[in-house]
Amino acid sequence: METIRLLIVIVLVGISGYFLVDTYFKYKAATGSTMDRLIAASRSSATILLQRAVSIVMAVVGVLAEVADKLDPGVGDTIKSIKPEFYLAFTVGLALLSILARNRTLP
């Protein structure tokens, strides 16, 4: 079970790492204001930019939880004990942000 969990974390961090590197190089190649360059780096979609940012942040949180669990099991348990209501609030908030971001890029 521990091996499967570690494999999942590695895969998710790899995907998020790809998002980070891809966005960085496309950002450096784009021109305009910072926001214009960020959106251009995300295939001209604020929704994709938002989702990439969320995946990177969640990968960092996941890695921190795993590292904290290895160093001090109490810290890892605290991070993992977030109430389900917070996940619900995060999901609904993310959905609302995605809708707003998508409306921003629609003609």
Image: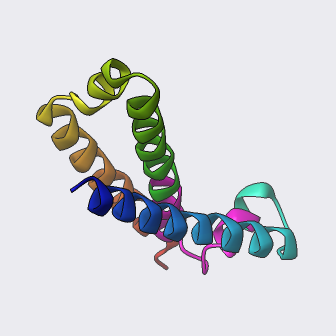
Whole-percent x and y of residue 49?
55, 64
Q: Please give left or right for residue 81 compared with residue 56 in the image.
A: left
Whole-percent x and y of residue 64?
48, 37
Q: Is residue 45 above or below residue 83?
A: below
Quadrant position of residue 28: bottom right
Which residue sits at x=21%, y=28%?
81
Q: Is residue 104 visible?
A: no
Which residue sits at x=31%, y=59%?
3
Whole-percent x and y of residue 60?
51, 45
Q: Quadrant of the N terminus?
A: bottom left
Which residue sits at x=64%, y=68%?
39
Q: Nearer the viewer, residue 9 or 92?
A: 9
Tell whether position 48 is magenta: yes
| Colouring mode (rainbow / by chain / secondary structure / one colour) | rainbow
Which residue sits at x=46%, y=52%?
59
Q: Nearer the viewer, residue 24 or 78?
A: 78
Tell whether position 20 is magenta: no
Q: Is residue 89 above or below residue 68?
A: below
Q: Please give left or right for residue 43 compared with residue 31 in the image.
A: left
Tell me where the magenta segment starts and ends, as one range.
Answer: 37-54
Magenta-drawn stretch, dominant element (helix, strand or loop): helix
Q: Is residue 40 visible?
A: yes
